Image (cartoon, rainbow, N blue to C red):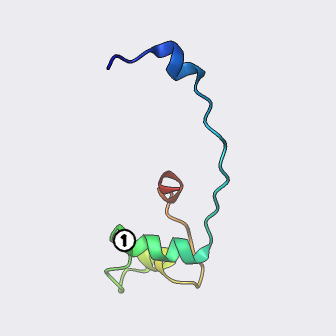
Amino acid sequence: MAVRPERALALRIPEIAQSCDERDSILYAPGIGIGRDTADPGQLGFAYEGGLKAVPTTAAVI
């Protein structure tokens, strides 16, 4: 089946709203290996509630 560029460009994809909360950030971090070294204070900010930071690649997953 050949790709028809005009049909692909005319395709309208509906907009979908997504959100990410603290729980999602905390669950995502260990999934990519952050938080394994509990002695590393740089990792704790991504894996625990106190001073929580979001991993920048979280947006790519959404």
Residue 60 percent location from the top left of the image: 49, 51
Q: Nearer the viewer, residue 33 or 4?
A: 4
In the visual, does 40 lie left or right of 11?
left
Residue 16 percent location from the top left of the image: 65, 49
Residue 10 percent location from the top left of the image: 59, 20
Q: Which amino acid does the dot numbered 1 rest on?
A: Gly
Q: Which residue sits at x=51%, y=83%?
A: 48
Q: Which residue sits at x=62%, y=30%?
A: 12
Q: Nearer the viewer, residue 39 or 31?
A: 31
Q: Residue furthest front?
A: 1
Above-or-below relation of 15 to 44: above
Above-or-below relation of 38 to 46: below
Choose top left, top right, bottom left or bottom right for residue 59. Answer: bottom right
In the visual, does 28 lie left or right of 23?
left
Choose top left, top right, bottom left or bottom right for residue 15. Answer: top right
Residue pointed to by mark 1: 31
Of the 4 image quadrants, the one containing the N terminus is top left
Q: Residues within 10 Å of mark 1 (few under 14, many from 20)?
A: few
In the visual, does 27 lie left or right of 23?
left
Q: How many numbered badges does the structure rendering display?
A: 1
Choose top left, top right, bottom left or bottom right for residue 39. Answer: bottom left
Residue 5 percent location from the top left of the image: 47, 15
Q: Which residue sits at x=50%, y=22%?
A: 8
Instruction: Tell me the SS state at disc 1.
Output: helix
